Amino acid sequence: MKRYRVREQMNGIAEPPGKVWFWELAAGVIDADRCIRCGTCVAACPSNSIGVHRMTGLPELVKMCTGCSLCWDFCPRGGLRYEALWPPSTPEVTKATEPFETASEASVGAWKITGGPPGDGLGALLERYAVRAGVKAPGVQDGGAVTAILSALLAAGEIDGAVVSKPSSGRDEPWKGVATVATTEAELVAAAGSFYNQTMALAELDLSRYPALPRRPKLAVVGTPCEVQGLRAMQVRPWATGAHRVDAVVLTIALLCTKSFDYEALVLRELRDRRRIDLERVSKIDVVRGRLVVEYRDGQVALDEPVKDFHGAALKGCEECADFLGRSADLSVGSVGSTVGWTSVLVRTERGRRAFGKARARLDVRELDDVAALHRLDALDKRTALRALQRRFDPDAPLFIDYEEHVRGYDGTPRQPVLIRR
Ligand SMILES: Cc1cc2nc3c(=O)[nH]c(=O)nc-3n(C[C@H](O)[C@H](O)[C@H](O)COP(=O)(O)OP(=O)(O)OC[C@H]3O[C@@H](n4cnc5c(N)ncnc54)[C@H](O)[C@@H]3O)c2cc1C
Ligand code: SF4
Ligand code: SF4
């Protein structure tokens, strides 16, 4: 069935010939515990049939599914099989000795999703820096680059707001991040710092809750790489959208990411209940150099433990992710590659360069300290993804998704895309 032209543009990957319904996305991704809570399916649904479950925070059907298939097509753990286009690179091509990259062809749709072909080093890259805000806002995670850049863009009228993550106002939810559109500098500052949970960020692009925004708003989105993948996929393949203003996003900033966590499992179970962390006193939670570090406001280090001890609290779907570097973003930012108190900034696109340029007067900018560290963690992330995919599917298969196999299960049995040997 070719009802939706957008499906014909899916990067040349064979698509299921029939409709894919929401309950198949649910069976293959959500119920299979592979959902990474990006909100892409909510934003992609042209009939606004997908919402966010109040208790679980997961996607749920809120009215009739028309079977348009787009939630499946754009889901980073469903039809958006960027792994099929971008198999994890071999260790040889991700060696730290690689020369400085030039921008890869950003006009090719496939590269927009993955950021580049296999073995593309750090991905499309125009410039790269270690960055620190001239005046750091309180609560920033590393160099405060993200908050400073967004504040500068807001002040310059380049954006009307930004999808960021603010602390939940729920009394029982300390250190939980929730998605919001910040439209003032004060709101941006209140949202500074990292929350180690996914927020269904793209669901926030239904802007009906923000009536003060202009009719044609210009927004930035700060998100984990999977969120930026979903967003970029939707942007390069325009379709009859629903309530969600994917078209309003003029800048994407990806936070470098090897894994995110389930809020209840990490913060409430592991930190509060098992390790007796007093969440009221916490000033910062950080994952740095393979360790989870929690600091109290008086400077005391409340916890410093290998992050692998918290494996059980991580989202299972993150294991399959091979995009630590946020290859499809305009700017990628993280702590890896820079000394403490600075943010590594990878400028990937002209849009990113323009945004960075607008903020430059507010920033201290210098050379990255340790480019090799970025390569190393990216290679490790890809190896982990490859292992996870091999465990899930055929241990001998190269990464290829056969949708014919996927559709063969159309007898009501739960099904997932199948990796086959070519
Ligand atoms: C889940 C997660 C995993 C990460 N893993 C790594 C890693 O492995 N290696 C690495 O180098 N860096 C990682 N980072 C990025 C790092 O923690 C900093 O966010 C980054 O260095 C920017 O620092 P900053 O001081 O410039 O940002 P700030 O000025 O503090 O701004 C951070 C911005 O990110 C937004 N934000 C915070 N949490 C979330 C969230 N969960 N979803 C969407 N937006 C959010 C905030 O609202 C704010 O706008 C991770 C971040 C997250 C949220
Ligand atoms: S991974 Fe994202 S797109 Fe897929 S089901 Fe979960 S929230 Fe929806
Ligand atoms: S590890 Fe990948 S899938 Fe998981 S939150 Fe980070 S970017 Fe998303």
Image (cartoon, rainbow, N blue to C red):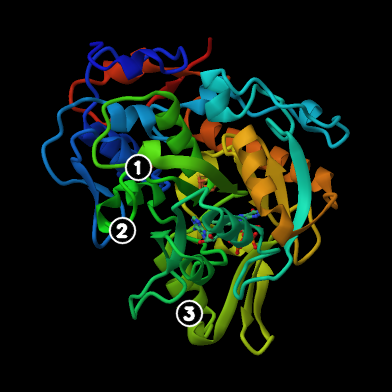
Choose top left, top right, bottom left or bottom right for residue 412.
top left
Q: Which of pointers 3 and 2 indicates the residue nearer the eye?
A: 2
Per the image, label 1 sits on a secondary structure element best described as loop
- In the image, 345: left or right of 285? right
Across and down, in percent, residue 229 comes to 49, 36
In the rendered structure, find residue 272 and report the number of the disc placed on it: 3
The image position of residue 142, as x and y in percent, is 68, 64
Between 244 and 280, the one lying in front of the other is 244
Distance Cα–Cα, label 1 vs label 2: 11 Å
Q: Position of residue 368 (x, y in %)?
A: 82, 50
Q: Is residue 294 left or right of residue 67?
A: right
Q: Quadrant of residue 192?
A: bottom right
Tell us which disc is closer to us: 3 or 1. Answer: 1
Residue where numbered disc 1 is placed: 216
Report which residue position mark 2 lands on.
212
Residue at 57 percent of width and 60 percent of height: 151
Q: Sequence order check: which comes first, mark 3 or mark 2? A: 2
**Classed neighbour count for the residue bearing mark 2: other residues with Cα under 10 Å, few (<14), some (14–19), many (≥20):** few
